[in-house]
Image (cartoon, grey):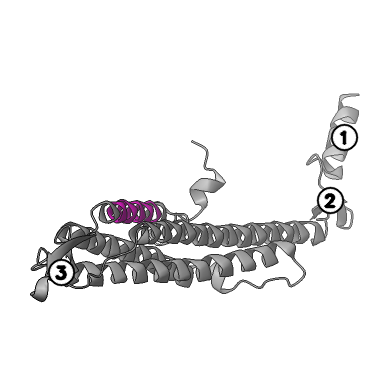
Amino acid sequence: MAVTHADLAPSRRRCDLGSKTGAFLTILSILLGLLSFILCLISEASRSQMIWEASSGEGKVIKSECTYSSSGKIPLLSATGAFFALAMAMVIQHTYLLVAVSKADSLLAITWDPDSDFAKSLTWQAGFFFVTTWVCFAVGEILLLIGLSVESGHLKNWQMPRESCLIIRQGLFTAAGVFGLLTVFLASGLYITALRAQTHTQDQENTRRELLEASVLYASPPRSPRRTIRAVPNENPTARQDRNGITLYDYLTAFDKHTDLV
C-alpha cells in the first residue's frame, strides 16, 4: 500500500483550529444563540402589561389605578434562561479561540507583510468581528438585565391596584434576542477569520519549504563517473573508467590463446 503525504502529515490535535472539536463548539455556540433568541421571543410574548382601572376614593373622587396582567414568572424565567444561554455561547466560543490561537505556532510566529492586501483584509476583519461581537453581547445582556429587574419587581401582589406600574416597553426582549443572534454569528466569523489566517500561513510555509528543497537539489554539483585503478601484468597501473568490467589483461589473455591455436 502506497504511503501518501497526507499519511505522513501530523494529525490535528483536538484544540487546533479546524479540528472536529472546533467545529462542534462553533455549532454548539450557534445553537445556544438560537435558544437564547427563542427564549427572548417567549419573554416578549408573555411580558407583563399594565391595566388601568377607575376607583372611587374619599369624597367620591374618581382616581385611576393600575394592575399587572400577570405575575411575570414566565418572562422572568425565560429571560434568565436567555441570559445564561447567551453567556455560555460567548464563553465557549472565545475560550476555545483563545486556547487554539495560543497553541497555534504558525499564528504566533506570523509576520504580516505591510504591503499585502490579504494581510490587511484579514487584520481588519478580525478587529471588526472581535469588537462588534463584544458590543452586541454587552447590549443584549444589558437589555435582558433590564427586563429581569422589571419583571422581578411584581412577583407578589401583582393584582393589587397601584398608582403607578412599571412595565417593559414592547420589543425590548426581541431586541435582546436579535443582539444575541448577532453575537454568536459574529463570533463564528471571528473563528473563520482565524482559520483563514492559519491556512494562509501554512500555505506560505509549504511553498517556502518546496522552494528550499528545489534550491538544494539544483544547487548541488553533478557527480562524476566512478573510476577504478586495475593492475595489468608487465604494465604500470592505469586509471580507466570501469564501464563493462573488461580490462586490458583480459584482451591480452584472449589474444594469447588465439595465437596458440594457430
Element at label 3? helix
Where 89 sits versus 261, above or below?
Answer: below
78 relative position to 91: left or right: left
Disc number for residue 129: none
Dot 2: few (<14), some (14–19), or many (≥20) neighbours within 10 Å?
some
Residue that mark 3 sits on: 154
Location of residue 39 in the rendering, given as x and y in whole percent from the top left corner: 27, 54
**Picture residue at 17% right of the left edge, 63% below the top:** 54
Determine whether the residue tagged by mark 1 lies in a helix, strand or loop: helix
Residue located farthest toward the bottom when viewing the structure as drawn: 58
* Rendered image quadrant of residue 157: bottom left
Residue 96: percent from left, percent from top: 39, 65
- Tell me whether the residue at label 1 lies in contact with that at label 3, contact meaning CB atoms closer than 8 angstroms: no
Residue 262 against residue 25 in the figure, above or below:
above
Magenta highlight range: 26-41
Q: Position of residue 58 (x, y in %)?
A: 9, 75
Comparing 250 with 262, the one in front is 250
N-terminal-most mark, 1 or 2: 2
Residue at horizontal 60%, vertical 59%? 202
Quadrant showing the C terminus: top right
In front: 129, or 6? 129
Q: Residues within 10 Å of mark 1 (few under 14, many from 20)?
A: few
Q: Which residue is mark 1?
A: 256
Q: Nearer the viewer, mark 1 or mark 2?
A: 2
Instruction: Describe residue 219's horizontal placement relative to residue 90 as left or right.
Output: right
Disc number for residue 232: 2
Q: Nearer the viewer, residue 42 or 182?
A: 42
> Observer-nearest residue: 76 or 70?
70
Give the amino acid type for the residue marked by disc 2 in the picture.
Answer: Val
